[in-house]
Image (cartoon, rainbow, N blue to C red):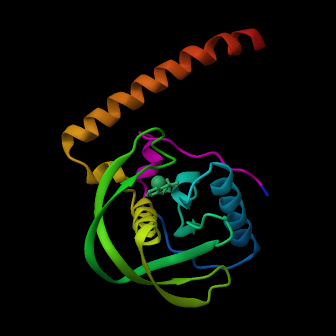
């Protein structure tokens, strides 16, 4: 298994719309395994294929405390949604930014598993939030897009500042390696 690198905002590849998975073969299952390893290593509670530059409709999720409830959704489709709730969200592609986002409280959905078999499920709480967050990624959408223009601008500034600091810290090491 391999830990994949995660694209970070404002990388334009995060804006691509993912295509449906049509072939359920060993290569797909390897991608799913790599995505789980990447998500657990990060660590995160979910990961969309888009974030690792694979533009296919694949999500991996584990919102359990013990990290023993892996859930893989391929070609997920919402069947229903109800209620509204606000929860603080973060994103591995938008490191260090945490903001409240309003989403449906409970959802039901249909998806395929890693063998292509269809299943239906309903979810609420963090799991429902996480699935909606991950499904957004497949459409090229980020949680930042749900915020007010002002909050989005604040997040962009903070990310720019942190990226500049990271570059400054990296520069001497890169020079020493030459
Ligand atoms: O690790 C993650 N935590 C999280 C917390 C609240 C709402 C959504 C998430 S998803 C995020 C991992 C990620 O970026 N998935 O795309
Ligand atoms: Ni995310």
Q: Is residue 71 visible?
A: yes
Residue 140 shown left or right of residue 73 in the figure: left
Residue 19 shown left or right of residue 24 in the figure: left
Nearer the observer, 80 or 117: 80
Q: Residue at x 55, y 60 (%)?
A: 45
Residue at the outermost front position: 65
Q: Residue at x 41, y 39 (%)?
A: 10
Q: Quadrant of the N terminus?
A: bottom right
Against 87, is 168 above or below? above
Q: Position of residue 115 (x, y in %)?
A: 68, 84
Residue at the outermost left position: 149
Q: For residue 84, which quarter of the picture?
A: bottom left
Nearer the observer, 44 or 67: 67
Against 155, is 120 above or below? below
Q: For residue 60, which quarter of the picture?
A: bottom right
Q: For residue 37, which quarter of the picture?
A: bottom right
Q: Position of residue 44 (x, y in %)?
A: 57, 54
Q: Residue at x 54, y 22 (%)?
A: 166
Q: Main secondary structure of the magenta part?
A: loop
Q: Is residue 178 visible?
A: no
Q: Is residue 6 magenta?
A: yes
Q: Quadrant of the C terminus?
A: top right
Q: Which residues are magenta?
A: 2-16
Q: Position of residue 31 (x, y in %)?
A: 69, 64
Q: Residue at x 59, y 16 (%)?
A: 169
Residue 4 shown left or right of residue 150 in the figure: right
Residue 152 shown left or right of residue 174 in the figure: left
Against 164, is 76 above or below? below
Q: Position of residue 83 (x, y in %)?
A: 25, 76
Q: Is residue 58 magenta?
A: no
């Amino acid at each position: 298994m391999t830990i994949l690198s995660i694209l970070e905002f404002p990388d334009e590849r995060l804006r691509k719309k993912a295509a449906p998975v049509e072939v359920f073969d060993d290569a797909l299952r390897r991608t799913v395994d790599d995505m789980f390893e990447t998500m657990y290593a990060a660590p995160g509670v979910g990961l969309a294929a888009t974030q690792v530059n694979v533009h296919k409709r694949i999500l991996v999720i584990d919102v359990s405390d013990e990290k023993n409830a892996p859930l893989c959704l391929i070609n997920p489709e919402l069947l229903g949604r109800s209620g509204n709730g606000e929860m603080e969200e973060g994103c591995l592609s938008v490191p260090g930014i945490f903001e409240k986002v309003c989403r449906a409280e409970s959802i039901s959905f249909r998806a395929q598993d890693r063998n292509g078999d269809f299943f239906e499920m309903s979810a609420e709480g963090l799991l429902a939030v996480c699935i909606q967050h991950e499904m957004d990624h497949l459409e090229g959408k980020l949680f930042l897009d749900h915020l007010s223009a002002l909050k989005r601008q604040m997040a962009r500034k903070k990310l720019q500042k942190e990226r500049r600091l990271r570059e400054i810290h990296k520069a001497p090491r890169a020079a020493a390696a030459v």
